[in-house]
Image (cartoon, grey):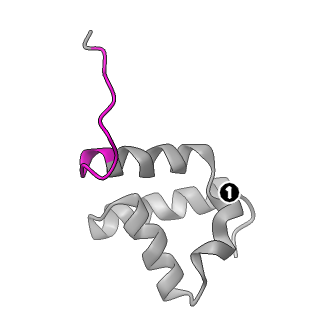
């Protein structure tokens, strides 16, 4: 298991990059590979990982688009 949410987040990012999948898919892959229910790891998902998952979902049009500022 992971020591903290940050180490879990780093592991998920590595999985996402390695398999070229979204962060949400990486979380689900981790759960599937380790026979863990997604509900059991909810305390390991930190704000940074939540934001990345939300961004992935927005890009996939699964969440409404938000206005962005172009600088």
Give the residue drawn at x 49%, y 77%. Answer: 30
Predominant SS along the magenta part: loop
Q: Position of residue 40 (x, y in %)?
A: 68, 75
Q: Measuring 58% from the left and 75% from the top, which residue is drawn there?
A: 38
Q: Is residue 65 above or below residue 40?
A: above
Magenta segment includes 59? yes
Whether the magenta-drawn stretch holds residue 41 is answered as no
Q: Which residue is nearer to you in this view: 57 or 7?
A: 57
Q: Where's the N terminus, which quadrant?
A: bottom right
Q: Position of residue 49 (x, y in %)?
A: 52, 50
Up the image or down, 49 lies above or below 7; here it is above
Closest to the observer, 60 or 36: 60
Q: Magenta residues? A: 58-69
Residue that numbered label 1 is attached to: 5
Say few, some or many: other residues with alpha carbon within 10 Å of mark 1 (under 14 / 14 to 19 / 20 or more): some
At x 60%, y 84%, the residue is 36
Q: Quick one: which residue is furthest to the right in this view?
A: 3
Question: Which image quarter: residue 68?
Answer: top left
**Residue 22 or residue 54, whichever sits in front:** 54
**Quarter-wise, where is residue 14 in the image?**
bottom left
In the rendered view, would you say 38 is above or below 7? below
State the image quarter where residue 2 is shown: bottom right
Quadrant where the C terminus lies?
top left
Q: Residue furthest front?
A: 64
Left or right position of 38 against 13 = right
Residue 7 position in % (x across, y down): 63, 59
């Amino acid at each position: 298991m992971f020591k903290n949410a940050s180490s879990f987040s780093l592991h998920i990012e590595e999985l996402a990059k390695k398999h070229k999948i979204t962060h949400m898919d990486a979380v689900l892959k981790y759960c599937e590979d380790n026979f863990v229910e997604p509900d059991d790891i909810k305390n390991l998902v930190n704000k940074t990982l939540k934001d990345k998952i939300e961004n992935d979902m927005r890009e996939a049009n699964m969440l409404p688009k938000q206005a962005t500022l172009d600088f």
